[in-house]
Amino acid sequence: MALKISNSIAISFFLLLIINFSIVESSNKIRAHRPCKTLIFYFHDILYNGENAKNATSAIVGAPAWGNLTKLAGQNNFGDLIVFDDPITLDNNIHSNPIGRAQGFYVYDKKEIFTSWLGFSFVFNSTQHKGSINFAGADPIMNKTRDISVIGGTGDFFMARGIATIMTDSFEGDVYFRLRVDIKLYECW
Amino acid sequence: MALKISNSIAISFFLLLIINFSIVESSNKIRAHRPCKTLIFYFHDILYNGENAKNATSAIVGAPAWGNLTKLAGQNNFGDLIVFDDPITLDNNIHSNPIGRAQGFYVYDKKEIFTSWLGFSFVFNSTQHKGSINFAGADPIMNKTRDISVIGGTGDFFMARGIATIMTDSFEGDVYFRLRVDIKLYECW
Amino acid sequence: MALKISNSIAISFFLLLIINFSIVESSNKIRAHRPCKTLIFYFHDILYNGENAKNATSAIVGAPAWGNLTKLAGQNNFGDLIVFDDPITLDNNIHSNPIGRAQGFYVYDKKEIFTSWLGFSFVFNSTQHKGSINFAGADPIMNKTRDISVIGGTGDFFMARGIATIMTDSFEGDVYFRLRVDIKLYECW
């Protein structure tokens, strides 16, 4: 009987060793690639061009030596820095009820083609969502889909991390574009 | 006896299955909402207005077409981009010994009300703290408290993640403001 | 026999308690400080100075009141905002085959000495690497090595977090610098 129990104990300790090893490694190795939360939003950007002050939701606030603040610069807008406060909607209709604001900035950062770098937040204060989701990353605009990082969140999105897939859903010349954003959170608290 | 051990093994393997399942899920599901580290700091921003070059710790470096670089723009400063290097203190006295610097930028990003978007770091190199804490997020300035994300850290704050709650502790017109920052880290390494 | 099995069960449940406690704590406490991935790259920045439009990979797009867009400002470039699209190479030779682009921005943010704040991405689309690594943090340029945060990643670098150690490998006046970046990822998915 003593032998049998000590056998059980031996087996259990052996398992414990394996399990503890797994736990220590888990912060590095074991990750679920299935999102813990998925969200889809659209946001709408109307760039100030000197004539649309009332409707504009964004403005050029930095430009290279060859640019100016009311027209996107030559060389694929390279160097233009835009600040924005864009309405977020649940569908692709700019007239739908906004459920939050996309706020932050982007820079056009390549001379040969349209690409940009984004730093911004989705800010929610509605019955549906309260809190914010923070984003950063490169946006190679000419690709059909582009992935940026969800680098944090607050409120309902406390400590969130994940990936946001951006698609240009529509655009009209230099003045209007609409982005669809598929957010997949892989860290939910 | 063989039967008894195999019973033990069966039970143990069953437990192992449960436990491993828990581990794989843990990166998604089980999170402690208690901070692993809490810190409170103040920082002090003196904006360059064309006449205070000696004392200024920040300057407007981007502005919309209707703005300029020595005065915050109309429409609630929308589009103004400010770069700063502000002293960090442990209390709310600007004359206290600075224990680090808050360095980075913010943009005012809404026409109807004061809001901003922040990207900056706390940089420490004292006996108390060595290393940096990196922040990003939306700051709806008119709210009493605002939460932004701690997106990373180095040195003493290696790999940190968390939430920073910002409060406007004081301000004087357009030239001076003091922020209180309550940092709660939920990931400590 | 019943007694023996219940002994085994008792021991196993006791172990289960310990283990579950470990799992709940693991998101806060148990972290491997050994990188799960290490990468070394160089990138090359040629700043537009009004005369090198063809070769320049970056441009000043914001400057303080005392600066301009073709020459870095007085007071250690304080307030200058630079947008860049720099080639990434595996060695320190600017003529080596670029394996990606470093894209984003930096601001010089201290009057007394050269320091900057960086927000950028490494963007890869080659046989070696596909995806992006996103960075943010303070860069006290005069230090031999500086640590910034890897705040996220996409593609091959899905959900990455870590530390990037930056070294100024070479520079020529105000126009050219080359940075070596040692990336250590501590979260790999």
Image (cartoon, coloured by chain):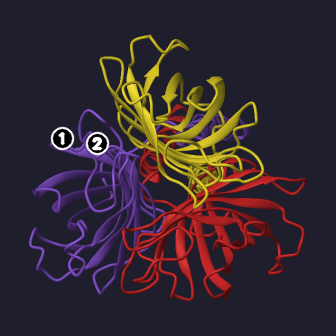
Chain colours: A yellow, B purple, C red
Q: Left or right of A40: which side holds A14?
A: right
Residue drawn at point x = 63 percent, y = 74 percent: C49
The residue lying toward the viewer, choosing from A164 and B186, is: A164
The numbered mark, 2 or 1, whose residue comes first in the sequence reads: 2
Does residue A165 lie above or below B130 as drawn? above
* Label disc, if present, on residue B115 of the rendered structure: 2
Q: Secondary structure at mark 2?
A: loop
Does residue B151 lie above or below A177 as drawn? below
Q: Quadrant of residue A128?
A: top left
Q: Amino acid at mark 1?
A: Met
Q: Amino acid at mark 2?
A: Thr
* Residue lying at the far front of the rendered structure: A51
* Label disc, if present, on residue B142 of the rendered structure: 1
Q: Position of residue C8 (x, y in %)?
A: 54, 41
Q: Secondary structure at mark 1?
A: loop
Residue drawn at point x = 30 percent, y = 17 percent: A127
The residue lying toward the viewer, choosing from A166 and A38, is: A166
Q: Position of residue A175 (x, y in %)?
A: 56, 29
Does residue A109 lie above or below B104 as drawn? above
